[in-house]
Structures are given as C-alpha cells and as structure tokens.
Image: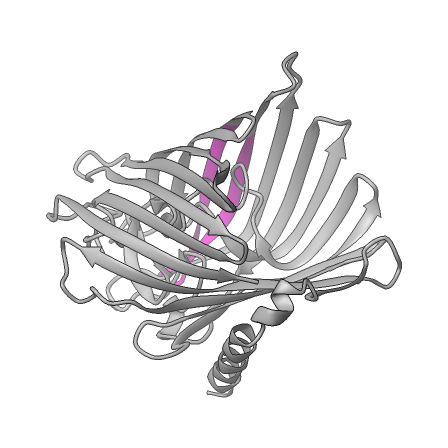
Amino acid sequence: MLQRFLMKSFSLCTLASVISVPTFAQADSLSWGNADTDLGKLTMSGWVRANYQDKDYSDSDHKLKFNAAKLSVKYDAKSFFGQAEYRCYQNDTLCDFSTLVNANVGYKLNEHSRITVGLQDMPFGIGRFWSSSWYGSSLDNAGLEDVHNLGINWQQQLGTNTVVNLAYFVGDGGHFVGDGDAARYAANYVKPDDATVDEIKERNMWVARINQQIPLDNELVKLNVGGSYWYSDLKNSSNDQTGHRNAWNIFGRLNYQDANLTLTAGQNRANTQSLSQPDYATVGSFESKYYVANDANYYVANVDYKINHFYQDYDLTPYASYTIFDKDKSDFATSTRSILGAQLDMKQFSLAAEYITGKNDVFIGGDSASLAEGDSSGHSRLLNLLFIYNF
C-alpha cells in the first residue's frame, strides 16, 4: 500500500511538472552543467501524449484523451553517468498505471569501456527498439524486444567499428502501480490468475551482443550487422524444477542519408519444466496477462525515411514495419502485426498517425491465447492518432 501511495503521488507531481514546463523547454533551460567536467551535466526531457483510437473490433474509444507522460533524467560526467525514466499512463483515471522503465548508474572505465548497474534495457537485438512505431512490434508483448531488467552491463568498443556487450541480470524489473503483477512496462513472466497454470520466474539472465559496422567505399551508405544471445534460468514455482531459455537473433541496418532499413531474425526456446503447459507460459505487461508460446521463430522488418523541412519548419518521417511470431507447435497459429505510419514534427510538437493490422495479436483485437495457440478474430485493425508535446 505504501509503495502504491508513493508511486501515485510521484505520478501526480511528475504530470504537474511536465505540464508546467513549456516556456522553460523553449528557453532550452532543462540542462545544467558540463559533461566534460567532474561535476557533470544533468538533463531533463520527456513528453506528454494524448491519443485518439478507432478500432474495427471495439466501439469503446472514439474520443481524444490523455494517454501517457514520460519524464527522463540523465546525468553525464567525466567518469560517472546515470539515467532514470518514469512513465505515467491513463486507462480509466489519471496515472492509474505508472512505472519505472530505467533507473541505473554507470562508470566509464576508459574512453571505450563502461559499466552500467541497475534497471536498464537488455542488450538484446539491434537496440532498445527494433521498429520505428510508437505502438511497437508484437515482440514487445512477447518479452523479447524493449525488455528492462535489473542487472549489470559491460560495454566495450573494439577499434572504430565494433561494439561488444556482456550483461548479467539477476531478475526482472518488478511491478509498480496498477493492476497487480502485470503493472509493468516490459513484458516478463508473471503469476497466472489461473491456479492450475504453472508460475514461471526468470532468473540469472546472461546476454551477449556484438554490433559491427561494415566499412564501405560510399560515405553516404552505412551498414551495421550483428547478433545477440540470451540464456537464463526459468524457475517453475509449481514443481520447484528449473528449465532454461535460449534465445538469439541476428540483425542488420542499412542507412542511406535519411533512409533506414532494419531487419531482425531470431529464435526463442523456453523450457519451463511444466508438465501441464509445456508449450506456453504466462507473461504480463501494461496491466494485462496473457500466454506466450515457449518456442518460436521471429522476424521484424522496418523502414523509415526522415524528410527534413517537408513543409517550411515541419519535418515528416514515414515508416512501416512488419512482425512475424511463428510458433513451433504445429497447431499454434502464427502471430503477425503490420504498421504503416508517419510522424510530423515542428519544434516541441509532434503528430503521429499509425494504421495497424494484427492477426493472433493480443493487443490488436486478440485475447489471452493470441500469442500462444492463437485466436478466432482474424485480422483486426486499429487507427492510432497521437498528439505529443516534447520537452
């Protein structure tokens, strides 16, 4: 109760401070200090977001409403650095779901090496996000993309073209203010509502990643390729047995001036040591609990192109992404999500429009079984309009 009260109070204070800063943001006064000194530099940033949604599978929306707010605080100095990111969402009432995303500190061993400790995004995949959309790919919901857990991450640059990460995470990032164990930003294994379903807890996560820039003769073209691997213990609390996750992916990004193409392909294998549900486990995020297939191959393709000064001071970025979550079990239906969107930016203000189609998609017309055996909804569609003030 005390944690919920403190987080709720922090949510209201954060939202109030976010709404009251536009004149300061325009004056560029949200940074203090100098990162090249021992004292360092402190920077605050974030956004406030409203949205309008139209769904072909629900009539419950069709109205503009406050959607979310983000506050990010970064610190950078000669030897030390740190970051905290906090988000507040509204489902029914203001900040009824709020959560820490990141909260970490780090030390620069030298110019090319650093260590980060705390709640942070895992170095799995090409980066924190594998697509350009605000809504994200379905691999967010499967717990493979944009995952934030508690651990330590060592990053080393080798030469001018290679970056290596080696990380250990003791456990997941925990849950915060909202509806029970699923009140979390990143998708993790959570306690099932059904007592007959085994509870899985992920511990001792080892993650390694290498990202290699390929030197090319054409300076306008940049190519990055790499891969990452994830191994962990999966403790089955129902029978006190321990299984393991083995996941990997390969990725590449091709950049030509302001155009980017990103491709990711990988595999997830999770042995939960469950006798009753060997093919799926309960995962939770954004106050929702659902089942995710233990074994699957996955693919993400994303393209975006930024058009600077599209019209006067407006910048336009169209983007498209397609995600496939192909389960190994023969009678489990493949999950897909496609997003066609564009974002218009002018100074602190942004407008984004996304047309999303999902099949066997838990957050696009699906149900709790969508990312496991599938659902009967067919293709579902969502129009997502976002109005954003950045500071």
Image quadrant assignment for residue 212: top right
Residue visible at 20% across and 40% down in the picture: 332
Q: Is residue 354 visible?
A: yes
Against 31, is 229 above or below? above
Q: Is residue 270 left or right of residue 3?
A: left
Q: Is residue 56 left or right of residue 69?
A: left
Residue visible at 34% across and 79% down in the picture: 93
Q: Is residue 131 visible?
A: no
Residue visible at 26% across and 39% down in the picture: 336
Q: Position of residue 140 (x, y in %)?
A: 40, 49
User: Which sits in the foreground, 260 or 342?
Assistant: 342
Q: Residue furthest right?
A: 38
User: Which sits in the foreground, 171 or 341?
Assistant: 341
Give the quarter of the figure containing the C terminus.
bottom right
Q: Position of residue 20 (x, y in %)?
A: 55, 77
Q: Residue furthest top?
A: 217
What secondary structure do most residues of the magenta stretch adopt? strand
Which residues are the magenta region? 227-252
Against 89, is 4 above or below? below
Q: Is residue 320 magenta?
A: no
Against 266, is 119 above or below? below
